[in-house]
Amino acid sequence: MVFKQYYLNCLAHASYLVADEGARVAAIVDPQRDVDRYIEDARQQGFEIRYVFLTHAHADFIAGHLELRERVGASIYLGARAKAEYPFTPMSDGDVVRLGAEVTLQVLETPGHTAESICIAVFGSPADAPASPDAAEPRAVLTGDTLFVGDVGRPDLHASLGWAPEDLAALLYDSLHGKLLALPDATRVYPAHGAGSLCGKALGSESFSTIGIQRHLNYALQPMSKDEFIRMIVADQPDAPSYFPYDAVLNTKERPTLDQALEKSMRALGVGAVMQHQREGAQLLDVRDGPFYEAAHLAGSLNIGLGGQYATWAGTMLDREHPIVVIAEPGREYEAVMRLGRIGFDRVAGYLADGMLALAGRPDLVAATERVSPEELAEELHQPAPPFVLDVRAPRECGQNRIAGSVNIPLNHLRARLAEVPRNRRVVVHCAAGYRSAIAASLLEHAGFEDLADLAGGMQAWVALEHARV
């Protein structure tokens, strides 16, 4: 057996290649939408990618099942409860797919995160190891979003599709205790997400574990009644980005492939064309790092840097119904547009040719955002008219350190709560380190706030100043 995990840090997403070395046949599980890496690895090792599995209709990214179908002819396999526009093979509990004489995939129906969720038990021995002494025991289980390292899948993401979180939580309890915890303790657990994903609330940083370790350490697998489990799992889930329901539905649709979308989106636009798109309602997305954006940017643009959780924040802050024009450092336009495609934001009208260099002779179109140091902010806070300090971190972050008198409005709620930010006072915005505050400052500027500044280095820099003073 050949087994490989692929990890995409931006979306905290794990996907898998499983192959039978003798038969030269491979399956891909939960692929990202840009599928070149799977195809190239299979080509180098002489494998035919014959199967592509989705453990469920993912909400946080667009899967690459249609791309693999179009590029290499792979057949699509989903849980038996799944509904989709494209042809697929429904897999019920206990159904198997044999990749060859040595490797078998067996489906476990594990509803709870979604109604159609499945896990996939992998039977076979690694190519560089002796055969398993007990071939009847799975070597690994690909758990999708049912079981994570340190957590379990949240049951509330399909509420907009008619599912009560409590009902899915009850199904999740049965799936965990009736299916996954019945596996041998040595079975390796490979989930579809890791730390940073919003598909759970306490995901661990490890990329894999075992059933035995999770049985002892995972808070959600400790002995408790079903009612206790339901109350615990439904409570205190983090806010889900607004694009999640859209992606969950899009993963069931027959849609253009990423290559087809990029062919329409990768258009170089002059300044005049960009301004015309803006007048017609397009969103101008500047993907440079915050300090570069704040030094000089096209007025009216929104900053979401490629260096952070770009796709998640783009899906949170942008309107998928309106076209997007990208402003990037020359050479990074493709990355910016492709990563939008990973979450299904395909309405990209093009990108500003030559980036900010194109505006060298148009100072009338260029704006800047003030940045203040922690020392400067400390002085301002002791003035008779101190600034309004806006903290855009998540509420759970604010319990550790806060700037006295600051007001917390999480970034994902800021657009809806702009009325709570005073327009007759100076506003200084901050987050943990500066990524989210740059987004927030660009949003406030777009909304007409003028006396505005971003705290350079965020709370990390503020805490370092306080420690230096002790």
Image (cartoon, rainbow, N blue to C red):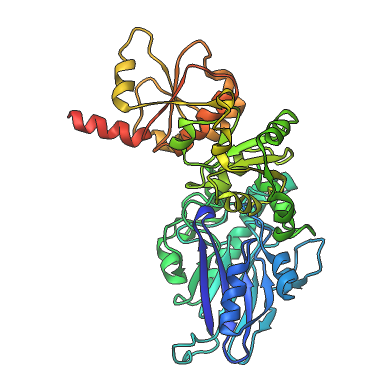
Q: Most extreme residue toward the front, as rendered? A: 361
Q: Is residue 468 left or right of residue 286?
A: left
Where does residue 245 sit, x and y in percent of width and height? Answer: 69, 47
Residue displayed at 44% across by 56% down? 219
Left-right relation of 71 to 434: right
Which residue is drawn at the image coordinates 50% and 89% (left, top)?
134
Q: Which image quadrant is residue 241 in?
A: top right
Quarter of the N terminus within the rendering: bottom right
Can residue 77 be seen by looking at this rendering?
A: no
Residue located at (70% from left, 41% from top): 320
Can you give x and y, in whole percent of width and height, for residue 317 in the image? 60, 37
Q: Considering only vertical position in the picture, is 315 above or below 451?
A: below
Position of residue 443 measured from the top left corner of the image (x, y, whole percent): 56, 29
In depth, the one of 260 and 50 nearer the eye is 260
Tally of marks: 0
- Which of 311/272 is in front? 272
Return the residue nearer the eye: 41 or 4. 41
Residue farthest toward the top in the current orientation of the protein: 384
- 150 vs 180, nearest the viewer: 150
The residue positioned 50% from the left and 28% from the top of the image is: 441
Quadrant of the image containing the C terminus: top left
Please state if 280 lies on the left or on the right of 182 as rendered. right
Q: Determine if residue 388 is in view.
A: yes
Q: Residue furthest left?
A: 470
295 with respect to 118 (left or right): left
